[in-house]
Amino acid sequence: MSDASQTASHASASIRGLHKSYGPVDVLKGIDLEIDAGEVVCLIGPSGSGKSTLLRCVNLLETPQRGTIEVAGHEVTDPEADLDLARRSVGMVFQQFNLFPHLTVLENCTVAQTKVLRRSKREAAEAARRNLELVGLTDKADRYPDQLSGGQQQRVAIARALSMDPQLMLFDEPTSALDPETVGDVLAVMRSLAERGMTMLVVTHEMAFARDVADRVAFMDGGVIVEEGPAAEVIGDPQHERTRRFLSRVLNPTGVEAPED
Amino acid sequence: MAMSMRQRQRVSRTVQYAVLVAAVLAVALLADWPTLLGAAFNPEIIAQQFPGIIVTALKNTIIYTLLGFVVGVVGGVVLALMKLSSVAPYRWLATLYIEVFRGLPALLVFLAFGYGIPLAFGFRFNSYVTVMLALGLVSAAYIGEVLRAGLQAVPKGQMEAARSLGMSRTRAMVTIVIPQALRIVLPPMTNEIILLTKDSSLVYLLGMTVSQYELTKFGREGISATGAGLTPLVVAGACYLVITVPLGILARRFENRADKASR
Ligand SMILES: Nc1ncnc2c1ncn2[C@@H]1O[C@H](COP(=O)(O)OP(=O)(O)OP(=O)(O)O)[C@@H](O)[C@H]1O
Ligand SMILES: [Mg+2]
């Protein structure tokens, strides 16, 4: 199998002192987060804690009021920076897939390549097919998104993002909108991406995935990162009360007492 | 005695049919059919309408409709973009325009054009230009609303996904949002052309020469000839239906396709 993603350079990212508010509502209150090249960081935390907002700031879908974001050593929050250029090096996978319904699976993966990167049709289709192979969907290239299951759509969305050769991949609850039986396929694709050395920032409620795949886990609450460290430590032995409470709710949603370890 | 649901439905259906049959019978028996048929479907008069009704009237109706539609689409695009603009005064202006022109009878707008333009500018536009403006300004209000609704019906995630792939706002609009909006607006836009076809009959208010007659004016002139009866109007009406019925079928096709696509 040809290996597209190992040739691409994978960037580090660094977020410093990030503040974001909507009017009077402070959503991010000073976020600091370093992601090394090839590292997988999982972001966990209760609803409304600002996880999506943080990802959207990194991808410049939102403009932070204060703070800096660097991707591969380039400051993307610099007002002089070319936003479209900066966005190009960061891939994003959304909870609701957001595939383009009027385009086939293959076209979903080629449209930005030809229109933004100015690749030839053939070149773009080759890259698209390589990435569809990576997510196991080469046979669906000519289908339309609404002919696929949720899990298949999300894998196409991953292939679409990969086709732009991103240096950093963002995932915002990529499995939350999926039927339970298709979650595994998507997580498997993400795991293989991680093994290929992709730099990834993943918002997820899949604690097993975070524990097994993430190098580090950051717990967010109320617009700040409360606790951060190696996955096994944050999930297995949280230091903060808020983290503990959140984890016990997520790991044991029915409220039955779990044995202490 | 209480009736079951089924029984009650059957009784009510029987009553409906009885009323319908009675109404049809009344019309059939009471109307003076020989006179009416003679007046409305006189074969000689029908023959007389051709070829003028086609080469002049039908042609002009189509030309007026298309001219009005072009102006309507251009104006509608501007209005839709203004309504979606982040600049508040643009939104207010567009809303004002749309509310005014949707709230006025087209007849009144045409009258205002017929009398107002000579008053304001001291001369008459070429009548095609006047028609184009009058029909266009009215339809722009409707088309603007249709387009705005179409653009807003495309989920926000589409723009975000396109932006996250590095597309500029304009590029994302052109390649991702507008093609999806077009599918959504196709049925209402087709209906708009049907309305416009009928509204084009109002251009007679602007005064016109014989060669500028459209279907309604042509029919009116036809029935004022002695002995013509109603036949010219019937022929003109048939010509309208030749345009509007296929458009109606087309609109339904688009609707079914859009339904299927959104499922
Ligand atoms: N465009 C917006 N305007 C105003 N407030 C917003 C906007 N977007 C998000 N917020 C607010 O910011 C807070 C954080 O939202 P965010 O979506 O980042 O949370 P989250 O951690 O991703 O939650 P979830 O797990 O539910 O996705 C919420 O209180 C939300 O109401
Ligand atoms: Mg979220």
Image (cartoon, coloured by chain):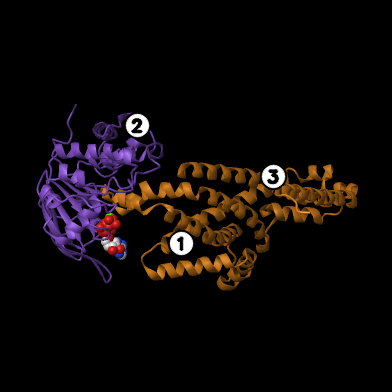
Chain colours: A purple, B orange
The residue type indicated by label 3 comes to: Ile
Question: Could you tell me which chain the residue with mark 3 belongs to?
Answer: B
Residue at left 27%, top 36%? A185
- Can you say whether B186 is above or below A105 in the image? below
Does residue A220 appear in this view? Answer: yes
Q: Which residue is mark 3?
A: B54
The residue type indicated by label 2 comes to: Lys
Q: Nearer the viewer, residue B230 or A94?
A: A94
Callout in the foreground (1, 3): 1
Q: Nearer the viewer, residue B65 or A66?
A: A66
Percent from the top left, x then y, of residue A167?
16, 44
Give the structural element (helix, strand or loop) at label 2: helix
Give the structural element (helix, strand or loop) at label 3: helix
Q: Which residue is mark 1?
A: B79
Same chain assignment for discs 1 and 2: no
- Can you say whether A192 is above or below A80 in the image? above
Cα–Cα gap, marks 1 and 2: 41 Å
Residue at left 41%, top 60%? B81
Q: Give me the disc on residue B111.
A: none
Q: Quadrant of ligand 2?
A: bottom left
Question: Dot 1: within a 10 Å radius of its alpha carbon, few (fewer than 14), some, or many (20 or more) residues?
Answer: many
The residue type indicated by label 1 comes to: Leu
Tell whether B121 sits left or right of A134: right
Cα–Cα gap, marks 3 and 2: 52 Å
Q: Nearer the viewer, residue B151 or A223?
A: A223
Question: Could you tell me which chain the residue with mark 2 belongs to?
Answer: A
Percent from the top left, x then y, of residue A91?
22, 46
- Would you identify the image quadrant in which residue A225 lies? bottom left
Q: Which residue is mark 2?
A: A140
For the N terminus of chain B, the quadrant is: bottom right
